[in-house]
Amino acid sequence: MPEASVPRRPRDVEQNGLGITEMLALDGGSKVRNRPWPRWPVWDEHEEQAVLDVLRSGRWWSVEGDRVHTFEREFAQFVQAAHAVCVTNGTAALEVCLRALGIGCGDEVIVPPYTFIATASSVLSVSATPVFVDIEAESLNIDPSRIEEAITPRTKAIIPVHIAGRPADMDGVLAIARKHGLYVIEDAAQAHAAEWKGRRVGAIGDLGTFSFQASKNLNAGEGGIIVSNDADLADRAWSVHNVGRTRSGKWYEHHVVGGNFRMTERQAAILLAQMTRLPSQTETRTRNAEYLTELLSRIDGITTLPADPRVTRHAYHLYVFRYDPKHFGGRPREEFLQALVAEGIPASAGYVPLYKEIVFQRKTAGWADGVRPPAR
Ligand SMILES: Cc1ncc(COP(=O)(O)O)c(C=O)c1O
């Protein structure tokens, strides 16, 4: 429909009761939100001191310092895991887990398509094949009832993602995994402190991964961690993240092919300080999200995701809702998003289903199909 023929509906001042403006900001009205949003990340002299202490100690390397090890212990305890291995980021965490499980060429790994690219690209990075299994409409997480039909003799693992911070159906995923002898790697990059039936996510499956990238609920700029209740798997992950060394082996003794995925002491120092804020920040997110849900559920055409009593803690890394254009004069979702952004409310359309991403349309996973030979 041409722009000019879209009906322009002035904001109804009586109805919204706020009396801020008569027109949408998109149509020339004033913005709903003019004040800046709260700063993220949140820090004070505790983080400053923690970083200074590492700097002045000269021990910037986890092999010499104690911050990384302390954070591993604290985070493991927080997610009710016996073991943890800090790594450079959440993408590396997934790759290390896959290598630790011996997954590689010819193997298949089941992943949901509605997630950040790393969930599936980590599988390609170890030369295995990601197999997409669709999500549930209500939770946006992998649908356990569709997993079995995707299992083949090559399937080695399932990676459920706790998308937006809402736990996936771990009972459903684990039941199928145990029946077929598959590993479960929880991608909990967005789900720090989230709980499935009272258990913190991450250590419910065989291995779990978290991200500490700048936008995440626990933030060190970059960073990641692997958690597990299985000592052997945790040791394997440790080896892979430390160029194939073993915990008890000599420095120049390499048992498997690994990489250098070690976290720095500066990252861990920030994370230790940020950890003290996580419980109260999670409470605030929950309160705010519940308030938003209550308000949004009053608006025709906006559908919030239904609550699930098995989700005893949603981490609310992202807040997701559905938009039905029928209730908004047929204005497409893109325009609705533009209108929100114009009002000063950051919003996005969410992830593109990964099978539609350009990388998955290519014949090869890398540049190999388009690289020219070097000039002679
Ligand atoms: C679901 C999911 N998995 C994995 C990652 C990768 O984490 P990182 O950015 O730390 O590599 C992210 C980060 O955005 C994510 O959201």
Image: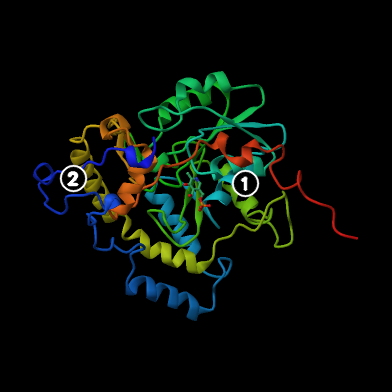
Question: For mark 1, what is the residue?
Answer: 236
Q: Amino acid at mark 2?
A: Arg
Badge 1 marks a residue whose secondary structure is helix
**Residue at the right extreme, as displayed:** 376
Q: Nearer the viewer, mark 2 or mark 1?
A: 2
* Residue 138 vertical position relative to residue 201 in the rendered view, above or below: above
Going from the N terminus, do you reach mark 2 or mark 1 first?
2
Q: Nearer the viewer, residue 327 or 259?
A: 327
| Circle on res. 38 | none
Q: Which residue is mark 2?
A: 11
What is the CA distance from the residue labelled 2 to the residue labelled 1?
59 Å
Kind of residue at disc 1:
Arg
Residue 39 position, x and y percent, is 32, 64
x, y percent for residue 169: 40, 30
The image quadrant of residue 158 is top right
Which class describes the residues within 10 Å of circle 2: few (<14), some (14-19), or many (20+)? Answer: some
Name the secondary structure under disc 2: loop
Q: Give the residue displayed 30% in from the left and 50% down from the top.
A: 26
Looking at the image, which residue is at 62% across and 46% down? Answer: 236
Q: Is residue 282 visible?
A: no
